[in-house]
Amino acid sequence: MPAEVGTRTSIPTGSPSEALVRRTRLPNDRRTPAAARALVRSVLEETGLAGLLNEALLLTTELSTNAVVHANTELEIEVAADTSGLTVTVTDFAPGPVEQLAVGPRNEIADIGEVAERGRGLLLVDHFASRWGTVHEGDGKGVWFRLDQRGDGLAGSSVRVPAQSEAPSLGALTGLLRSGSDRHTDEGLGDLAADLLSRLARLTGAAGGVVRLDRGDGMGRQLLARYGRAPRDNADIIRVPLTTHRPYSGDLELDAAPVGYAQALATMVAERFSLHLENDRLRRADVRRQTWITFLAEASELLAQSLDVNLTMALIPQLVVPRLGQWCAVHTTDTWGRLQLAAATHAEEAALPQLHASLAEAGPESILARLEEASRLGTQVMFGAPLEGYAVPLVARGTRLGTLAVGRHPKHRHDADEVAVLEDVGRRAALAIDNARIHDERRSVARTLQASLLPPALPHVEGIGFAAEYVPTGSEVGGDFYDVIPFGEQQWLVVVGDVSGKGVQAATVTGLVRDVIRILVDDGKTLSEILWRVNRTLVQRGGGRYCTLAMASVTRKSGDQLTVCLHLAGHDRAVLVRADGKTGFVGEGGTALGLLETITSPDVAVTLGPGDSLIFYTDGVTERRRGRELFGSNRLRDAAAPLAGYPADVMAARLRSTTINFSVEEPRDDIAILVLRNDA
């Protein structure tokens, strides 16, 4: 038992001949405890008492800090060491009784929470010191402690286990509970729990203890830490629940009778460890939310890249499984509002046929009935075994498109965060499906409108080959067009044009130009007059759009030759391919139609012999890009040279393929190619 508080005239040491005594006065400064520890450390090193180092430094820190904080004066420290132990005296010079620095006997402490903060240092001295007491010397008063050296190199009282009726050292417990603040990993939490259990067991005399934790991840309550013998189901068990928020839950069990201070200490340790668990829960929740945000961003990016309805619906289950569930199914509504399975996937490939069979079952309690309910009501629904999970409606722009069903994992139920993410995925998926549908509809309308601006078929003429290729781009109708019109006896008019811009307005102007040309041809107008009237029409009704035009009259003369009269109204020159493979450009540039009131359009006569060809094209061919490089008219001419001798349709198809394969990018402009060949 420690010495009682009282006045002494001498401090117990070993033999004077063997004692080493050091004494110094230190200022009232925050660095004083460090200086006091340095003095004690030097004495222990000189006397070979390294086994007392930890306890001596701890108690010296407590007494010197207490003197600096509460006495607010200089302090004197005396360190006396011999072969049997160490004695340290800390004296301050403040007025007042020394009892202000002490705490009464342990049996007078009614509640562990009533111990003042300033008394914890002396409780620590009481726990670890072999003996301790107080001293009055002149105008100073102080506290001394003695640490005896044992045969095993430890202080005498540092290894004793207190009885359950004793009050443990609050100073030691406070130091214990301040540990582990930087342990944020699973391994760190486990180590902290084991450390707390071991120290708590030593302080209370318990045979062992365990900490169990359930993180709500479907794994149930797991053993986080264990010390000594695991508690058994008997009366001598202290069980304290860990105060954490959902989905965390757990408890601390101690193999000790709930008497004395054991229950209070176990509660304090559980509450302190619960703070670390709450930090862990918040950290995991923050990491999880960041993961979900990243997942939603990646899902949105992937869904936005697809403008094909079928591809979009096939992509959605692949994004959901296995992150949000074990299986996923996408149903869409048909014209009559009935649900039809569009795509489904399962984490286990072997279970996919059974999933399809379950989704196809009908009946009031079937999954399909629950999905129809979700679609009809526009709210999320749950469905039970065997395919337990959630279904959310797919609604975009106020239109019900179907449902998204997700089955839960076998050992994990969907929590609130996952349901919220699932609903968010449903909204993004519905918007992606609706965008793809709108894109398909616009593309279908554009293709239909574009087809109406082109001739359904080119005329078949004996001895003359006409062939054309057209490649539209995107969902916008373009302004490129071509036509071949009978132009009297043994005469035909070849037209290739390009109206500026895209969209419905460009299509309207394209149809206007094409119809005006056909009407004027039927009226027997000459090429010059046709160009003049088309220009006047565009100036008056073109809405500011202009048109480039290549117009050629083809006349069959006696023999095997064709005479071509070519007019270019701001259009690219045609490529002439002779039967022997020689190539060149023909035509002279004129004024584009729709820009000026008056135009100039020089005519150029070309004679095509047997096997000769004339190639007309729009700027979608020459402006085909590969990075910064253009396809260009010269590359087109070089690609046409090896095609001499081939039929017109083969030449057009080969030139189209060469143009498209020039770049891996989608064409930015419509591509139109028309080939006129003398097949005599």
Image (cartoon, rainbow, N blue to C red):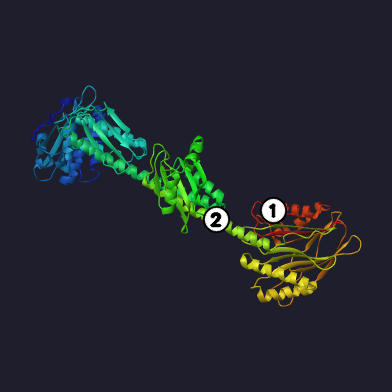
Q: Is residue 246 above or below residue 604?
A: above
Whether residue 20 appears in this view of the structure is no
Percent coordinates x, y for residue 263 in the rendering: 18, 35
Of the residues shown, which amino acid type is indicated by label 1? Ile
Whether residue 118 appears in this view of the structure is yes
Q: Which mark is residue 437?
A: 2
Percent coordinates x, y for residue 259 in the rendering: 15, 32
Residue at horizontal 87 percent and vertical 54 percent from the top? 580
Which residue appears farthest toward the right when viewing the image?
559
Residue at horizontal 81 percent and vertical 70 percent from the top? 603
Q: Nearer the viewer, residue 476 or 442?
A: 442
Quarter occupied by residue 583: bottom right
Which residue appears farthest toward the front when viewing the image?
363
Quarter occupied by residue 413: top left
Q: Which mark is residue 475?
A: none
For marks 2 and 1, give the CA distance. 27 Å
Q: Is residue 245 left or right of residue 6?
A: right
**Secondary element at image label 1:** helix
The residue singled out by tag 1 in the image is: 660
Percent coordinates x, y for residue 289 in the rendering: 40, 47
Which residue appears farthest toward the bottom when viewing the image?
597
Q: Is residue 303 left or right of residue 547?
A: left
Q: Is residue 206 above or below residue 314?
A: above
Of the residues shown, which amino acid type is indicated by label 2? Arg
Percent coordinates x, y for residue 387 in the rendering: 43, 40
Mark in the foreground, 2 or 1: 2
Residue at horizontal 56 percent and vertical 49 percent from the top? 310
**Secondary element at image label 2:** helix
Which is more N-terminal, label 1 or label 2?
A: 2
